């Protein structure tokens, strides 16, 4: 998170503004045409779920999942607690602000070195236990919040393991080729709560700008009503690369392929570029579970996939090294890892990173 106190005062009153202030205005939001394709919906309880997951990961790098076994009333409670958190007074939220060098807590996406303008959103990151930060937000009573987030973490971690195993099998690998259970047991669960106030000029602002997630996969719950999530469907016979909206579907969760899966599967599937747009009608929230590895994890293609006919398509490094590279290169990280001869460059002001107003 960048320095919150340095933010314009109206960061906490976006809901009340009648126009988009200059530092929140973005151009080039219509860089790609919009497609009306529909992101596949996979029923995890159906016998052909694995085949559907494989095809969705290859064509889209994303799908919606139903039949996942997470009770809808738990999703409702997670959403209610998320709304409650963001409705706290600014001073209360700032008590739980993400400190320097820390990933968890309240704040805005830390993209200040890439973009000159600000996202129309607030965020709250929970890493591991929700208890410590909850005490800062609700000194008196944070039991419902903690119980709900802990329960959600348990069920969603378990779901992520099931999905990753299904992805392996769909790519022709065996479940034993990767110890997902061991990895996920050692990793801290990461939940990202996102809040998007209504916006008077939605075409001029962005909730979260286009990016890929670093995780293996991300499992997203989005609130009902207005859509916000958009992802890029790459060029195919049906048309050029295009933005596709993923409308909320009650009870369904969105699964996004992240950078780590692209690397461990040696490029057989690609991480999906996505963003969150804003709207003028309804405040929107979303809850993302980032399924990542423990720090000791070596970010490299699975050995099983590598042989004389298939060299590793990505340079190997540790997970902490990957994350620091990502902070430097942002959306260019994977491209750099695919071309190991080049030195990583960090151009603070090249066109692909900044957004001219
Ligand atoms: C498993 C993950 C995914 C991480 C890194 C690591 C732990 C913290 C996650 C987030 C959560 C908040 C947004 C993000 C952009 C951030 O700054 O921290 C995410 C990041 C990524 O997707 O790159
Ligand atoms: O709110 C959304 O739909 C997307 C959020 C997202 O991409 C993220 O938190 O990484
Ligand atoms: Fe994301």
Image (cartoon, helix red, strand yellow):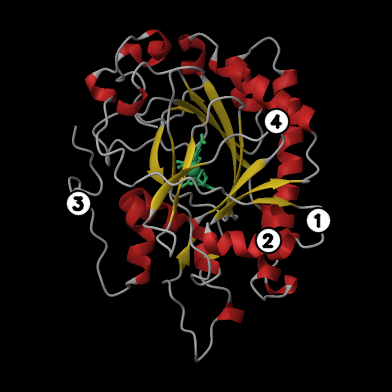
Of the two numbered discs 3 and 1 in the rendering, the one whose residue sits closer to the viewer: 1
Label 4, label 1: how far apart the Cα atoms are: 28 Å
Q: Are marks 2 and 1 in contact (CB under 8 Å)?
A: yes
Residue at mark 3 = 347
Label 2, label 4: how far apart the Cα atoms are: 30 Å
The part of the image, by quadrant, that contains residue 246 is top right
Q: Dot 1: few (<14), some (14–19), or many (≥20) neighbours within 10 Å?
A: few
**Element at label 2:** helix
Q: Answer with left or right where residue 195 lies relative to residue 149.
A: left
- Mark 2 vs mark 3: which is more N-terminal? 2
Judge whether 97 appears above or below 292 on screen: above
Residue at mark 1 = 46
Q: Answer with left or right where residue 225 lies relative to residue 150.
A: left
Residue 52 circle label: 2
Q: Are marks 4 and 1 in contact (CB under 8 Å)?
A: no
Residue at mark 4 = 149
């Amino acid at each position: 998170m960048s320095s919150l106190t340095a933010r314009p005062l109206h960061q906490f009153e976006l809901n009340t503004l009648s126009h988009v202030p200059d530092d929140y205005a973005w151009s080039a939001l219509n860089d790609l045409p919009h497609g009306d394709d529909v992101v596949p919906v996979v029923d995890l309880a159906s016998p052909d779920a694995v085949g559907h997951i494989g095809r969705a990961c290859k064509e889209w790098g994303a799908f919606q999942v139903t039949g996942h076994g997470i009770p809808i009333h738990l999703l409702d409670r997670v959403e209610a607690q998320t709304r409650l958190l963001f409705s706290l007074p600014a001073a209360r939220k700032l008590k739980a602000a993400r400190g320097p060098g820390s990933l968890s807590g309240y704040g805005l996406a830390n993209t200040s070195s890439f973009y000159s303008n600000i996202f129309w959103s607030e965020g709250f990151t929970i890493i591991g236990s929700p208890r410590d930060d909850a005490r800062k937000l609700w000194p008196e009573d944070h039991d419902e919040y903690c119980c709900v987030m802990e329960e959600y973490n348990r069920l969603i971690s378990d779901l992520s393991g099931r999905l990753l195993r299904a992805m392996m099998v769909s790519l022709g690998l065996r479940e034993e080729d990767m110890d997902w259970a061991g990895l996920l047991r050692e990793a801290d669960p990461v939940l990202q709560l996102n809040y998007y106030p209504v916006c008077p000029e939605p075409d001029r602002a962005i909730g979260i700008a286009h990016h890929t997630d670093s995780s293996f996969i991300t499992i997203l719950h989005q609130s009902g009503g207005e859509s916000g999530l958009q992802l890029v469907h790459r060029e195919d016979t049906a048309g050029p690369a295009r933005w596709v909206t993923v409308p909320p579907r009650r009870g369904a969760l969105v699964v996004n392929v992240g950078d780590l899966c692209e690397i461990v599967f040696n490029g057989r599937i690609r991480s999906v570029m996505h963003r969150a747009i804003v709207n003028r009608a309804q405040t929107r929230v979303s809850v993302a579970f980032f399924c990542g590895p423990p720090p000791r994890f070596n970010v490299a293609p699975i050995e099983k996939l590598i042989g004389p006919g298939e060299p590793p398509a990505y340079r190997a490094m540790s997970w902490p090294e990957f994350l620091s590279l990502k902070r430097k290169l942002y959306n260019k990280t994977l491209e750099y890892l695919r071309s190991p001869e080049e030195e990583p460059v960090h151009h603070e002001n090249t066109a692909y990173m900044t957004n001219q107003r």
